Image (cartoon, rainbow, N blue to C red):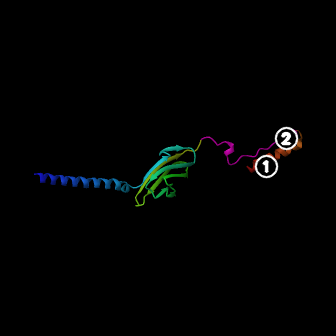
Amino acid sequence: MRDEIQKILKIVGIIIFFSLVLLYVGYRVAPLLRGPIITITYPPSGIAVDEPMLEVTGITKKTTKLTMNSREITIDDEGKFIDRLLLVPGYNILVVDATDKFGKSRQRVLEVIFTRPAVLPPPSQRFFEPPITEIDPDALMEPEALMEFNESQETEQTIN
């Protein structure tokens, strides 16, 4: 009877040992099978912005190649990435694709809406400002100077 109990305990011990080994191997291999991990920290999907230049930031793990809309992005040693993207007015779709060393890939899709600002930018930020013509008040009293000023205004209006 004692021999039978020892055999049963031996078999149970072997089963427990191999079960623990299998659990440990599964624990170590599972992350490799899952593929890369992408976390977009900014912008959140569905955001509406009023600036045409958008900075996309995030963190990735177990990634050897990272692309956004088929354009490769550099990743630092910690897995962080920053990329700037010029948006078109309206609805924009950004596809971030990460690939690991085994060829497994994962995608994140961001939807961003670019709304043009309703107010004109201040004059210092405009591309074209009309020239300011200074007038000497004393010269306005003379009819010849007034005629020259009117002629210059007419030529500027025809050019514009």
Disc 1 and disc 2: Cα gap in Å? 19 Å
Amino acid type at circle 1 is: Thr
Q: Residue furthest left?
A: 1
Q: Dot 2: few (<14), some (14–19), or many (≥20) neighbours within 10 Å?
A: few
- Dot 2: element: loop
Residue named by callout 2: 136
Amino acid type at circle 2 is: Asp
Q: Does the magenta run of residues contain 135?
A: yes
Q: Position of residue 88 (x, y in %)?
A: 55, 50
The residue range painted magenta reads 118-140
Q: Position of residue 143 (x, y in %)?
A: 89, 41
Q: Residue at x 62, y 40 (%)?
A: 119
- Dot 1: element: helix
Depth order, front residue of 79/144: 79
Q: Quadrant of residue 26?
A: bottom left
Q: Residue at x 29, y 53 (%)?
A: 23
- Left or right, 117 with respect to 144, comes to left
Q: Dot 1: few (<14), some (14–19), or many (≥20) neighbours within 10 Å?
A: few
Residue named by callout 1: 155
Labelled disc at residue 116 = none
Camera-near label (1 vs 2) is 2
- Left or right, 115 with respect to 103, comes to right
- Left or right, 128 with respect to 148, comes to left
Q: Position of residue 73 (x, y in %)?
A: 51, 56
